Image: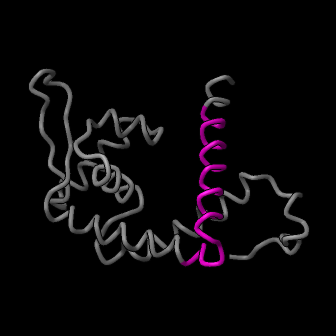
Amino acid sequence: MELPENFTIDTIDQFPINFIFDLIGRQHHIALKKELEPYNINVSEYHIIMKLYTEGKKTQQDIARSFYLTEGTVARSIRHLEDKNLIKRETDENNRRRNFVYLTDKSKKLASKMDDLDNQWENTVCNFLTKEDIHNLKQVLYKITINSINTKEKL
C-alpha cells in the first residue's frame, strides 16, 4: 500500500482522523485475511465468531445490531459458518421466529487461535508504545467511538 507522500509525522494534522482509522483498519483487514485463509473463513465471519467467543450465545438480531449490519447480511454469514460446522443455531423456545447462535467446540478452538493472532498483530504494531500509552490510546479511541455513534444518531 502506498501512503501519500505528504503523510508524515510533521504533516499528520493535515489528515482527518477517519483517514488514519481507514489505513489502520485496512492493514488489519489484510493481515486477518491472510491469517484466516487456511481456515476458509472471511473477515466478516471472523467478527461473528469472535463476538460469540467473547460474549457467548447471541441472537442474529443482536449480532446485526452490534455490527450495524442488516439481519440478512448476518443470516448469510451465519449460514456459511453453520455449513462449515463452526456455528450452531437454535430456535428460541419463547419466540419461534428468533434464533440463537453459538459456537461449536471446533470453532471455540479456532477462535482461541484467532484471538492469539489478533493480539499478536496488535502487539507487533504497537511494540513501540508502553502499556500506559496503549491504555491511554484505547481510552481516547473509546471516547471517539462513543461520540461518533452519538453524532451519527443526531444527524
Q: Position of residue 20 (x, y in %)?
A: 72, 60
Residue 20 placement, left or right of 28: right
Q: Position of residue 86 (x, y in %)?
A: 19, 59
Q: Residue at x 15, y 65 (%)?
A: 106
Q: Residue at x 62, y 29 (%)?
A: 150
From what the image shows, is residue 107 above or below residue 66? below
From what the image shows, is residue 18 above or below residue 117? above
* Quadrant in the rendering for residue 33: bottom left
Q: Position of residue 53 (x, y in %)?
A: 28, 54
From what the image shows, is residue 120 above or below residue 81? below
From what the image shows, is residue 34 above or below residue 141? below
**Observer-nearest residue: 138 or 115?**
138
User: Considering the image in quadrants, where does the N terminus appear?
Assistant: bottom right
Residues in magenta, as a range: 124-149
> Is residue 4 inside the magenta stretch?
no
User: Considering the image in quadrants, where does the C terminus appear?
Assistant: top right
Magenta segment's dominant SS is helix
Q: Residue at x 67, y 30 (%)?
A: 151
